[in-house]
Image (cartoon, grey):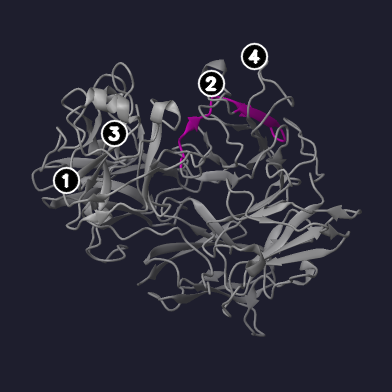
Amino acid sequence: MKKVVAFFILFVIAISVHAADQIIINEIMYNSQGTDVEFVELYNVSVSTINLAGWSLLDDNDTHSPCQLVGTLAPSSYIVVVGDKASFAAVYPDVNNVNPNDFDPNGTGWSLGNNGDTVRLLFNSVIHDSVAYNDGGGWPGNADGNGPSLELLHPSLDNNLPGSWDPSLVDGGTPGRQNSTYTTNVNPVCKDGYRNIPLPKSSDHVQVTVQAYDLEGLDKVELLINTSTGTETIRMTDDGTNGDAIAGDSLFTGTIPPKASGTLVKYYAKATDNIGQTDMWPNDAPAEYHAYTVDYTPPALMITEVMAINNSTISDEAGQYDDWFEIHNAGATTVNLEDMYVSDAINSTQMFKLPNFPLPAGAYVLLWADNDTEQGLLHTNFQLSSEGESVALFETIDHGNVPIHTWKYGRMSADISMGYTSPEATAPDYLRTPTPRQHNNPAYFFDICINEFQSTSDFGGPDDWIELYNRGTQPVDVSNCFLSDERGNNTKWQFPDDTIMQPGHYLVVWEDELGFGLSSEGIDVIMFTAPDSTTGLDFYDFGPQQADWSEGRATDGGSVWRRFKPPTRGESNDSGNTVSQKSNSSTPGEFTLLQNYPNPFNPGTTIAFSLPQDDFVTLKIFDILGRQVATLIDQKLVAGFYTFEWNAEHVAGGVYLCSITVNNRNQIIKMQLLK
């Protein structure tokens, strides 16, 4: 039985050392001198011998085969996972603690990218540790083909931070033994900062929180703020007062007081240990900083269409048919895209900076996702995956670097695009006709669509189901088509022979028939693919779900998605209710988001708000970096008192933020889940 109602990406309460991870990635050779001899060294920081059965190593590509680990790893011991055993042995004949399996034997497996890659350590297919290294951006560039490896300075450090690594002091690194750069007197760590309000207003007290710790002990953590009126320094605290949630959890909070409308507020944090060593968030502060502009409203920009396999649809200036995506200015005035960012990962907010490009009202611009920036200013430094991934547009640094528009797309086939069929659409669909630089053709690619689903109920058992609907005018044979909840694994469940859907009819498939359930946490997707298993027919990326609520198209087969209680399984969605209204004959006098109750809570809490007049309401969840991760309510409601239940039974403890917006007015509450 799954009971997660809605979900904030949680901020895990900090620990002071990395050692709780048991096995960590400790050294990486991704580009050696001469013939490339790659290896990854793992280290057991625990006090117990660990059986390596079920452990594996993988790069950033899920289609590659993980390299399985073998044997056991004693405490304070190393194991070296190599690309090719023969090549490694020729260069390192004295290293014996080598994993029996290699990840690129004779060049037939996968290798580590010289310009950056991700090394992932998995246990039973779940990521246990990962390092997203690079050859720039603060990462030691000398490890890129000059002889040294990347070495972690100390096992306690966060190995995803560039400052935790140095190039080895000896050419070839130190595989299978203590790193040459090992030090016991490491710098403090200051990282993973966030502010509680993505787009602050002139009346807002803005709380900034960072994770900070040091082996020798911290002296202080400071928040440094720069505005047009000067610089101020605020002492950040971890005492459970003045906005800090929990005392002693290594999360330090400082509060920026209200600033005048239009003020550009730049800020960064600095941690200083007891011997004067420092670390900054962000890493290169003060040259690098975080910021927001008071009372700023992002422009009406949308990523309206994406094509990940462009064989013949449209060519670029060089006559090449490359991946592309389209940005549309849906506002009434020209918007300059300069210093905004686009990305193929929702968590990477500064991947490719856009050039000086005024986009007139109503106009479209095409960006070529070809990883070939030398071809022009509108050619990005990334490509799009045909397996499906994300596209994202972010504001400038000075405007908060908040997401303007982000979404995930499904499995792509040649010359088929995915995008929004109308300005009112809340989710993308496969489009019948690609329309680069033009208003999208509203015709859907396929008549059968994912129409509604449910992932959890309070009754337990096989409660998940997926409803399909024929929105066309003709019968459609869906025999041997597929349903799946996982990109890259499209063939989980196949429709039986002679499955014919009549126009206007529904087909419901239950969890016990599917052989898989849908995640209540919203980490899955729903994929509907053709019998060839590669042509996407429909796709929906869903967020966290609430027990006994479903989610589906507001109008059967339409492009606007809503939540329904009760669900409308096997019948029209038009009858669904999407939020609970409290019985009360009076009308509220003001718009208010009440503090959730109970708070702190475990595992359930109630979010309540009042609406003084009929209005459009959005109730959203943001993660610690201000990124939108779920929308609980997004519809027009009549005046009244409303409640939304959140059951966090399967969510780890942490601090969460809930934001409600009504007619450009916004309120936010902080909630604490204790476990």
Q: Are marks 1 and 3 in contact (CB under 8 Å)?
A: no
Q: Magenta region: which residues?
A: 348-368
Q: Where residue 103 sits: x, y (%)? A: 39, 35
Q: CA distance from mark 4 to mark 1?
A: 52 Å
Q: Amino acid at mark 1?
A: Thr
Relative to 314, say whether 245 is above or below.
Answer: below
Identify the residue at horizontal 17%, vertical 42% (top origin). Answer: 187
Residue bearing mark 4: 318
* Residue at x 16% of width, y 26% of height: 169
> Is 654 on the left-hand or right-hand side of 98?
right
Amino acid type, callout 3: Ile
The amino acid sitting under disc 4 is: Ala
Label 3 environment density (alpha carbons within 10 Å; few <14, some 14–19, many ≥20): many
| Nearer mark to the viewer, of 2 and 3 | 3
Is residue 374 toward the left or the right of residue 411 in the image? left
* Quarter of the rendering containing residue 502: bottom right
Q: Earlier in the sequence, mark 3 or mark 4?
A: 3
